[in-house]
Every structure is written in C-alpha cells, then in structure tokens.
C-alpha cells in the first residue's frame, strides 16, 4: 500500500555550480538549518507526469545537501482509486459534475488504509509534504497519529475549479500547516483561516539524461531510429495522452503548417503514462483515429521495442525538432515547456495556466489560443531560422534564471522551515 523509493547518492556541488554564488549560499545555509530534521514526500505515482519527475530530482538533492529526505508512493489496492482521483483532477481543472457517495467512499477509504499502513510501518517525519489531491485527506489522518508539520502541495491549475468539489475538499486543508501552489492565481478562495500559502513554480533538473546537452548527431540518430525522417522538418509535443494536452489540436496545427511546409512531420510522444492516469488508452485510440493513417504523424505511446530509453527519446526529439508545441488547454505548469526551452528551442504553448508564466509571448516562445494560431506560428518559425535561434536562446536563458531544480528545492525547504516553526508554535507538531 506504500512503497519507499530509494535513490542513489547525488553530488550537490554539480547543482550548486549552476547557481549564482549568492543563490547557492542561500540554499546551503537553509539546508544546514534543517539538518537533523526528517522530511517525507508522498505522492501517488512513482513515475510518469511532472510530480514524479520533480521528486526524482529534488529528493536526492535534498539528501545531498544534508536534509534527511525520503520519498513514499502510495499503491492503493482498490483499482477504482485512480479512476476517482483522475475525476477529481479533471474536476479541479473545471470539469462539471459531482462525485457519487460510492466514489467518495473509495477516495477516503483508500487514504484511511494508507494512514493505517503508515502507522503500522512506523513511518515518521518532522515535515510531511503531501502532493496533489490524491493525498489531500491524508493530512487529517496523520494529525491523529503523527507528530510533524504537514504541507499540501497542489500542482494543478485551480483557477476554475468545480465548485461542488471545492466545497467538499477545501475543509481538508485545515489539517495542514501550509499550502504550496505553483502560481498566485491558483490559490483557492475561502481557505481556512490561518493557513499559510507559499508559491513555488515547478522546475526541471538540467543534469538528467533527459535535459543534459545532446549532440545534434546523436539526436538525429535516435530520431531516425524511431522511424522519423531526420532530414525533414519536425514538430514535437511531448505529453501524456490526456484530454487537457489537446493532441487533436496539435494535429490540426500541424495540418495547417504542412500546407506551406509539405515535408513537415509531427511526433506526439506520450511514453510515460502515469499509473495514476487511467484515461490514457482511450485518448490514444481517439488520437490514432484522428491522425487517420497520415504517415507524417508519429505517435509513441508505449516504450516497448523503442531504440532508446524514455529520457533519451524525449531529449532527442526536443533537441532535433525545429519547433516544439505544448498546446494544453489547462496546465498547472508544464515541465515539458521548460524542458523544451532548456534545449534552446522555440516552443508554442497554449495560452493557459503556468505556460503563461513560462513563456514570454514573442520573446521566449509563443502563446496561442487556437490550433489555427499554433499552425501559423509553426509555419512562421519553420520559415525563419534566425527567429528560431533568437527565441530559442531567450527561452534557455529564461529557464536558467527561473525554472531549475535548485530554486524549487529552496522553495520547498523554505516552506518546510516555516511550517516547522509554525507547528511548533501552535503545538500541532
Ligand atoms: N514525459 C516523459 N515521456 C513522455 C511524456 C512525458 O518523460 O513520453 C515527461 C515529461 O518530460 C515531463 C513530464 O513527463 O517531465 C510531464 O510533466 P508536465 O508538467 O509537462 O505534465 P503532467 O504530465 O504533469 O501533466
């Protein structure tokens, strides 16, 4: 019901070297203040999706800086749990409807079981980070049996949540010492009095296989081995197959751009379906139908039989493509956007949520409101190599300054430190 994920040691200095001396000094000083404290992060999937990606880097780095940090993943036995939490995710992003009593019972019941398991295994921490709505009810349950400050981190776009669901879930935040959101705009109205909020935009790890510099030759080789013609222009969207990522809109945009660039190809890469996302298979089917046998469209939805690892393929396609797209219609914060920008590529993003903070329109990428606009931007960028180079280089610089993992870890440790002092003061810890 819960797994503890082990990580090999990492070298903190490599990350500190990426930072300005001031920022590196602040991070090491803050970590030193937290040494002797135990931190646990809990989320609902070991791999697939942005949260897993962040924790995969932030947890080892935190340890390397001397803060004892563990990562726990819940593995509920009840198969309907992830159907319900995916509905919750969609509803928090605006989908209509209500959960049935049965669905609520599955949600709360599974987290009761997780809390029992936490207690049985004697897991304890000074600071608990519980990620996303999948874990929200656990804060209250930890209250009953465990000391420690509790922080709820919500990574999703909460600007237009389903009001019925907000009424159901918001009272659960009262069990927390702190709430962390990706953007100011996502902080829910009507929070329980006294609940502190911190903003921490997500970030990427520049030192992973996925994000470190790949030579154009290697990128072309992997691209070719995937069955894509590496000598013709390529547009790529890297994303789980998910309704909010609008893969159909990406296909429309590609079709429009192909009118002026007939050799154009499109890759839609969604290998890392998270195991907390049961809708993926239906979306794949629908997108396959929509692509209608077009040989210029390459869909990748399973890692089986591919010539390289997931991370190498993401890196190769982002490095090799002329233009990247993230045409989401909701996006708390798109790690794929920062990953693409870090490769020095122009990216066209949906004008929504966190993407609006990541891309400065016309400077470090383009923001679009429709497939039509996306298609026109693709065509414009394909026709102008200098524009691609300028936008790409601005994009990389923007990520360097704002969206790399040491900064996010600093934000998390700051939240931990503040929550710890708050819980000691109020006696909840
Ligand atoms: N990803 C991947 N392989 C894929 C598709 C996605 O590794 O085939 C990764 C992607 O590189 C990124 C994460 O999954 O690190 C997706 O995070 P994002 O914040 O963009 O979206 P989410 O899936 O969390 O909604």
Image (tube, rainbow, N blue to C red):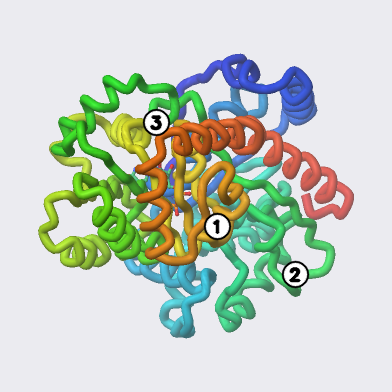
Q: Is residue 335 above or below residue 99?
A: above
Queried on whether the Cβ of the residue with tag 3 lies below 8 angstroms from ligand 1, the answer reads yes
Mark 3 or mark 1, which has the lower sequence index?
3
The picture quadrant where one finds residue 276 is: bottom left
Asked if residue 219 lies left or right of residue 391, the reply is: left
Would you name the residue on which mark 2 appears?
Answer: 191
Give the foreground label among 1 and 2.
1
Give the foreground label among 2 and 3.
3
Q: CA distance from mark 2 to mark 3?
A: 38 Å
Q: CA distance from mark 3 to mark 1?
A: 21 Å
The picture quadrant where one finds residue 208 is: top left
Mark 2 or mark 3, which has the lower sequence index?
2
Q: CA distance from mark 1 to mark 2?
A: 19 Å
- Residue in front for this viewpoint, 23 or 232: 232
Q: Residue at x 52, y 69 (%)?
A: 93
Q: Position of residue 371 (x, y in %)?
A: 38, 64
The label on residue 210 is 3
């Amino acid at each position: 019901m819960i797994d503890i994920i082990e990580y090999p040691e990492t070298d903190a200095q490599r990350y500190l070297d990426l930072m300005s001396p001031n920022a590196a000094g602040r991070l090491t000083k803050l970590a030193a203040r937290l040494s002797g404290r135990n931190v646990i992060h809990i989320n609902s999937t070991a791999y697939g999706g942005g949260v897993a990606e962040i924790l995969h880097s932030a947890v080892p780095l935190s340890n390397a800086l001397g803060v004892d940090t563990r990562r726990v993943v819940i593995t509920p036995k009840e198969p309907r749990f992830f159907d319900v939490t995916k509905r919750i995710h969609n509803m928090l992003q605006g989908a209509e409807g209500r959960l049935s009593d049965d669905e609520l019972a599955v949600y709360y019941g599974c987290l009761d079981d997780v809390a029992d398991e936490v207690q049985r295994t004697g897991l304890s921490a000074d600071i608990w980070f519980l990620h996303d709505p999948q874990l929200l009810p656990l804060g209250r349950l930890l209250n009953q049996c465990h000391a420690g400050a509790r922080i709820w981190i919500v990574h999703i776009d909460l600007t237009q949540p389903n009001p019925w669901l907000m009424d159901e879930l918001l009272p659960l935040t009262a069990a927390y010492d702190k709430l962390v959101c990706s953007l100011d705009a996502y902080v829910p109205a009507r929070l329980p009095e006294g609940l502190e909020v911190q903003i921490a935009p997500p970030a990427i790890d520049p030192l992973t296989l996925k994000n470190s510099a790949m030579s154009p030759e290697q990128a072309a080789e992997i691209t070719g081995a995937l069955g894509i013609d590496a000598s013709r222009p390529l547009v790529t969207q890297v994303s789980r197959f998910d309704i909010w990522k609008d893969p159909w809109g990406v296909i429309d945009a590609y079709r429009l751009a192909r009118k002026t660039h007939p050799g154009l190809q499109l890759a839609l890469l969604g290998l890392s379906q998270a195991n907390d996302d049961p809708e993926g298979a239906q979306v794949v089917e629908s997108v396959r139908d929509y692509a209608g046998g077009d040989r210029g469209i390459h869909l990748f939805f399973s890692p089986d039989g591919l010539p390289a690892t997931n991370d190498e393929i993401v890196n190769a396609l982002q490095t090799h493509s002329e233009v990247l797209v993230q045409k989401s219609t909701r996006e708390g914060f798109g790690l794929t956007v920062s990953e693409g920008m870090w490769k020095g590529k122009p990216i066209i993003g949906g004008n929504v949520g966190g993407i609006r903070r990541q891309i400065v329109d016309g400077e470090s990428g383009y923001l679009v409101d429709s497939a039509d606009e996306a298609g026109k931007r693709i065509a414009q960028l394909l026709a102008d190599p200098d524009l691609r180079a300028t936008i790409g280089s601005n994009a990389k610089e923007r990520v360097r300054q704002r969206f790399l993992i040491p900064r996010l870890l600093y934000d998390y440790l700051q939240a931990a430190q503040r929550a710890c002092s708050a819980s000691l003061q109020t006696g909840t810890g």
